[in-house]
Image: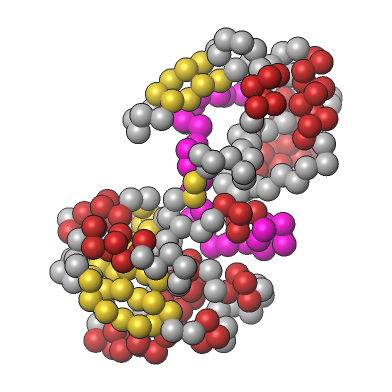
């Protein structure tokens, strides 16, 4: 990051503070020699798309469509895509958990019995603090918090080997024991028999534990499943193996605030 500060202009061109009191600062790098230094510094390094691969795929599809119309040049704006790059070594980089909320399913007695086939199950304090406390004390295990509006439970996986036969076979063993994969394939598909889950219809995704608990209390969802975050380094390693995680597996933070930078990619726009 020190190198990036060296190549940037002295004065920032944009400074804003978002709703979470995170300050976003943008510097402009226009000196051709500094740009060449930056290109040389990035040359040979691996870039991993950890958030926004759907946007990237859409950008490629749009680029190909525009090229198909003819009349384009290498500096046509649609050949390029804005991105925000962060070193995985950056101390401020965090991956936040993304909790899952189901709308149409209940914790039946049968489901609770089935949980015990794979997990050690215990009751915990039915509050955001109780659930967060359990998860933080089990960061090194495959653990989940469950809240249904009246009671809260802890689920701790008994044996990693127990999940292998129930997780889809076209991923490595390392991916099969990711918490979000266990939650999707064991808890949702195998135990609760949810079938296909569609975002904002029968499954919701939220960042904060308190928000998850409050949505269940308000009747916006029937069950909240709370998870621990995955490490940034693990995400990079899996991506470099060309494997995909379930949607909403990573929430890198802090992000650039929406709308801070925009780029015109219309047909006649050039860089």
Residue 146 appears at what percent x and percent y?
Answer: 29, 69
Query: The N terminus lies in which quarter of the figure?
Result: top right
Given residues 51 and 28, the one toward you in this image is 28
Magenta span: helix, strand or loop, mainly?
loop
Compared to residue 16, the image places residue 190 above or below, namely below
Left or right: 47 with respect to 119?
A: right
Residue at image location 54% in from the left, 56% down from the top: 231
From which residue to which does the magenta span run?
237-263
Residue 42 appears at what percent x and percent y?
Answer: 77, 35
- The image quadrant that residue 171 belongs to is bottom right
Left or right: 46 with respect to 185?
A: right
Is residue 222 in view from this perspective?
Answer: no
Residue at image location 36% in from the left, 65% down from the top: 137
Compared to residue 87, the image places residue 103 above or below, namely below
Given residues 54 and 237, the one toward you in this image is 237
Residue at image location 44% in from the left, 50% down from the top: 96
- The image quadrant that residue 121 belongs to is bottom left
Residue at image location 40% in from the left, 63% down from the top: 227
Left or right: 149 with respect to 264?
A: left
Residue 148 appears at what percent x and percent y?
Answer: 22, 69
Residue 177 appears at what percent x and percent y?
Answer: 54, 74
Compared to residue 162, the image places residue 223 above or below, namely above
Compared to residue 188, the image places residue 76 above or below, namely above
Give the farthest residue toward the top.
11
Given residues 21 and 251, the one toward you in this image is 21
Q: Indicate whether residue 243 is drawn in magenta.
A: yes
């Amino acid at each position: 990051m020190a190198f990036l500060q060296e190549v940037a202009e002295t004065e920032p061109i944009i400074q804003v503070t978002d709703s979470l009191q995170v300050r976003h600062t943008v510097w402009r790098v226009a000196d051709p020699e500094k740009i060449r230094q930056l290109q040389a510094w990035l040359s040979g390094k691996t870039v991993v798309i950890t958030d926004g691969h759907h946007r990237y795929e859409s950008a490629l599809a749009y680029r190909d469509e525009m090229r198909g119309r003819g009349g384009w040049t290498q500096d046509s704006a649609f050949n390029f895509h804005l991105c925000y790059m962060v070193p995985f070594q950056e101390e401020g980089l965090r991956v936040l958990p993304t909790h899952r909320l189901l709308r149409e399913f209940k914790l039946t007695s049968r489901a609770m019995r089935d949980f015990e086939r794979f997990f050690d199950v215990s009751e915990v304090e039915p509050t955001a603090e109780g659930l967060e406390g359990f998860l933080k004390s089990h960061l090194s295990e495959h653990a989940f918090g469950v809240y249904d509006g009246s009671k809260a439970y802890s689920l701790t996986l008994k044996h990693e080997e127990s999940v292998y036969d129930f997780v889809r076979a076209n991923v490595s063993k390392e991916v099969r024991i990711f918490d979000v994969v266990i939650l999707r394939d064991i808890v949702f598909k195998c135990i609760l028999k949810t079938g296909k889950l569609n975002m904002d219809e029968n499954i919701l995704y939220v960042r904060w534990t308190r928000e998850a608990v409050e949505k269940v209390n308000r009747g916006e969802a029937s069950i909240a499943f709370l998870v621990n975050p995955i490490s940034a380094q693990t995400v990079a390693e899996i991506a470099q193996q060309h494997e995909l995680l379930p949607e909403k597996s990573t929430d890198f933070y802090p992000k650039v605030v929406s709308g801070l930078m925009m780029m015109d990619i219309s047909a006649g726009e050039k860089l």
